[in-house]
Image (tube, grey):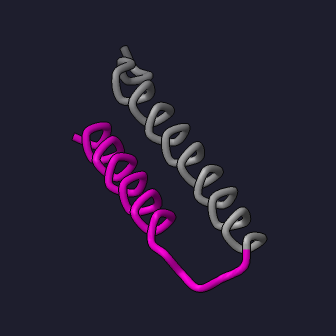
Amino acid sequence: MIPVIALMIAIYGTGRLLNDGFKRHPQSAGATILTWTVSALAIVALWFLAIAINSQGSSPPAGY
């Protein structure tokens, strides 16, 4: 159950970050580059954590 929730959070978070990045905001080009950089790093971190949790969830418990 936990790996599925981690994947749902990664998918939802990626969608939210991309959606917010594509919105038009009255800002400078430097702020847009900063927004996309932070969004890309956050997406990579979300997927890294989701994959790490998913791989831990598929391994047997330590007592076996």
Taking depth in this image into account, of 15 and 51 the one nearest to the observer is: 15
| Residue name at image x 42 percent, y 52 percent | 14
Left or right of 55 on screen, residue 36 = right
Q: Residue furthest right?
A: 30
Left or right of 21 on screen, residue 15 = left
- Asked if 33 appears above or below 50 in the picture, the reply is below
- Asked if 40 appears above or below 1 in the picture, the reply is below
The majority secondary structure of the magenta stretch comes to: helix
Q: Residue furthest top?
A: 64
Taking depth in this image into account, of 48 and 26 the one nearest to the observer is: 26
Q: Is 18 included in the stretch rendered in magenta?
A: yes
Q: Position of residue 20 (x, y in %)?
A: 45, 69
| Residue name at image x 73 percent, y 71 percent | 29
Q: Position of residue 7 (x, y in %)?
A: 33, 41
Look at the image and tell me in which quarter the N terminus lies: top left
| Residue name at image x 34 percent, y 47 percent | 11
Range of the magenta residues?
1-28
Q: Residue furthest left?
A: 1
Left or right of 6 on screen, residue 33 = right
Number of marks present in the image shown: 0
Taking depth in this image into account, of 38 and 48 the one nearest to the observer is: 38
Q: Position of residue 37 (x, y in %)?
A: 69, 56
Q: Is 54 included in the stretch rendered in magenta?
A: no
| Residue name at image x 55 percent, y 37 percent | 48
Q: Position of residue 3 (x, y in %)?
A: 31, 37
Look at the image and tell me in which quarter the C terminus lies: top left
